[in-house]
Amino acid sequence: MAIIADLIDADTDAIIELGCGYGINLFRLMRLLKDQKFRWFGAEYTESGRSLCAKLADLDGSEPMDVPFIDHAAPDLGFMADVEKPLVFTCHSIEQVSIIPNNYFSILARAAPGVRGVHLEPFGFQADPSAPNSPTHRNFMHDQGWNLNFFSCLKLAEEKGDIRIEHVEIEKYDTTPNNPTSLAVWISTV
């Protein structure tokens, strides 16, 4: 989670994970950033994940956390209406949605002023078919019925002028050759 923490700006007012499961990444960030104050959001698709995340946040008690519903296939980000400079991140949650909407990143970029997006997702084979693990990775994702359009949607949002991609690192973490993690960082330009 240090990579996420390093991308937080001085004026960031909210940390939002989309597809947080039971919130482990957010709780790790809270510990890492214990002297900084943010609004915390753990958005999750499953009722069980939202319920457990809310219970753990209550038990922890260090920071209040909102735990709204999110569906990557049809994102409704109304819960972000009153934040100004959020850092929005995903960590292996988009991977399980076979096709996200073409305007997915444009929706994220327009959800609040000053959005910064950080994605630790397995999209390397989409961005660079010649990357070391691409053939195995592509076959794995196809066999699982997992995401095949993350990178094209990211590039489309940049082409439309809704985001500026700041950094892409293919196969940043490749401990699992059939599903290595790549990194994408962007900022809203709308």
Image: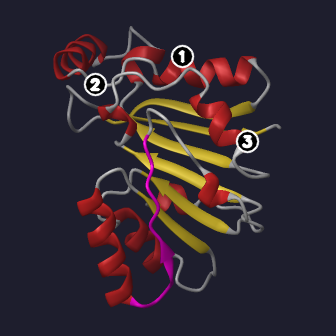
Q: Which residue is mark 3?
A: 110
Q: Please tell me whether residue 66 belongs to the stretch shown in magenta.
A: yes
Res. 176 image quadrant: top left
Determine if residue 7 is in view. no
Q: Is 73 on the left or on the right of 181, as rendered?
A: right
Few, some or many residues within 10 Å of mark 2 (<14, 14–19, 20+): some
Dot 1 falls on a residue whose secondary structure is helix
The three-letter amino acid code for the residue at tag 3 is Arg
Q: Nearer the viewer, residue 113 or 6?
A: 113
Is the residue 54 above or below the residue 101 in the image?
below
**Quarter of the N terminus within the rendering:** bottom left
Q: Which residue is mark 2?
A: 146
Res. 125 image quadrant: top left
Few, some or many residues within 10 Å of mark 1 (<14, 14–19, 20+): some
Q: Which residue is mark 1?
A: 152
Q: Nearer the viewer, mark 2 or mark 3?
A: 3
Q: Are marks 1 and 3 in contact (CB under 8 Å)?
A: no
Cα distance in 3D space between marks 2 and 3: 26 Å
Q: Please tell me whether residue 59 belongs to the stretch shown in magenta.
A: no
Main SS class of the magenta portion in the image: loop
| Residue 45 placement (x, y as % from top left) | 35, 50
The numbered mark at residue 97 is: none
| Residue 90 placement (x, y as % from top left) | 45, 47
Q: Is 72 on the left or on the right of 152, as rendered?
A: left
Give the residue drawn at x 61%, y 74%. Answer: 39
The three-letter amino acid code for the residue at tag 2 is Trp
Cα distance in 3D space between marks 2 and 1: 15 Å
Q: Nearer the viewer, mark 1 or mark 3?
A: 3
Few, some or many residues within 10 Å of mark 3 (<14, 14–19, 20+): some
| Residue 86 placement (x, y as % from top left) | 67, 59
Q: Are marks 2 and 3 in contact (CB under 8 Å)?
A: no
